[in-house]
Amino acid sequence: ASRALGAQPAPRALVGRPSCSLRLVPEMAPLRSLRRRGAHLAAAGVALATALSALAGARGAAWLQPPNGQPSTTAQSTGTQEGQLVLPGRRAAFAAAGLALPLSTVMPAVAAEPSFTKTARFEVQFGKGNAVKKRKLVIGIYGDEAPILSRSFVHAVENTYPGEAGRQVRYRFADVKSLETDKAITWADFEEGNLYYKAVQEFDSRWIGNKVVKLPLAGDDTITEERNGLRHDLAGRVSMRMGGNSFDFSVTPVANVASLDATNVVIGQVLEGMDVIEDINKMRLVGGKPSKKVRFYSSTLI
């Protein structure tokens, strides 16, 4: 960018000292030259702004010292102190512009989190027995980011799934299904099982009778190919398996679980109760599950 503007490159021997300060000599800033080269400034503006902002913001890394540690002739003639930077011409104007640049011109804005459409509250129980203390877990749901998966989650929270197996689909009294330390805690082992047993009439040339078949709890209305831009970059991310056809959901106990981005879609975020998630994550594993039963004593929307 500096070549496009006709400026001379910075001398390689100019090494900064942390205690030095930047001083611009007003009489050596030819603004007329900048106006004549306005077209070049427009073309190289973004690259120049980024470079100068980094230069101006670096501590002790400016062009501060002439070769051999001797004061420049300019410094002698203008009365500046040794070690102070005197940037002639265009370089002085550019450095001043770099100092004035706001951080937002070179740093991309962080994308805002989407809004929650619903909030679910769970009471979590460690171990068996009604006397065991219940602990609160609150999850915000990004219903607009994954509508079908979020709908399945809400149906299980409220026990309102309209499918044939609807009566069994409820997170209340469901247990942790699996635990992968520092990766994912997955619910749910439902109280009445994760399969639906249905009696169907069977016709045969020899006899007519009923046969019991095993069916998944989730019907075709839960199948989806939806995706979104949310990632498992925060601790407490709540996600469901890509493709749907399930009521299982996972919670990340730690941040940056990139491996789940390939298999799950984020549908929510833990708002309260990360201490519960962290304690589950620390539990000893037995057959891929926590050594102690971890159960949802209740689930509801709030």
Image (cartoon, rainbow, N blue to C red):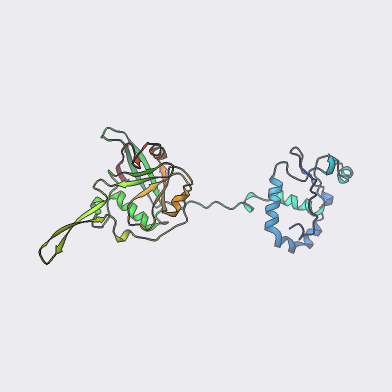
User: Where, by quadrant of the figure, is residue 6 drawn?
Assistant: bottom right
Query: Where does residue 212 sit, x and y in percent of width and height?
Result: 18, 56
Q: Residue furthest bottom?
A: 205
Give the residue drawn at x 24%, y 50%: 168
Q: Residue at x 33, y 41 (%)?
A: 287
Q: Is residue 40 left or right of residue 169?
A: right
Between residue 70 and residue 53, name the one nearer to us: 70
Instruction: Describe residue 259's horizontal placement relative to residue 148 as left or right.
Output: right
Check the image and report above or below for 246 versus 74: below
Give the camera-side residue of 237 and 243. 243
Q: Nearer the viewer, residue 65 or 23?
A: 65
Residue 106 at x, y = what percent? 64, 52
Q: How many marks?
A: 0
Residue placed most toward the observer, 218 or 199: 199
For the N terminus, give its image quadrant.
bottom right
Q: Is residue 18 visible?
A: yes
Residue 281 at x, y percent in the picture: 40, 39
User: Can residue 302 be seen from the camera position used here?
Assistant: no
Asked if residue 289 is positioned above or below residue 36 in the image, the reply reads above
Q: Residue furthest left?
A: 207
Q: At 78% across and 61% down in the image, what residue appears? A: 35
Q: Residue furthest top?
A: 131
Q: Decide if residue 65 is on the left or right side of residue 166.
A: right
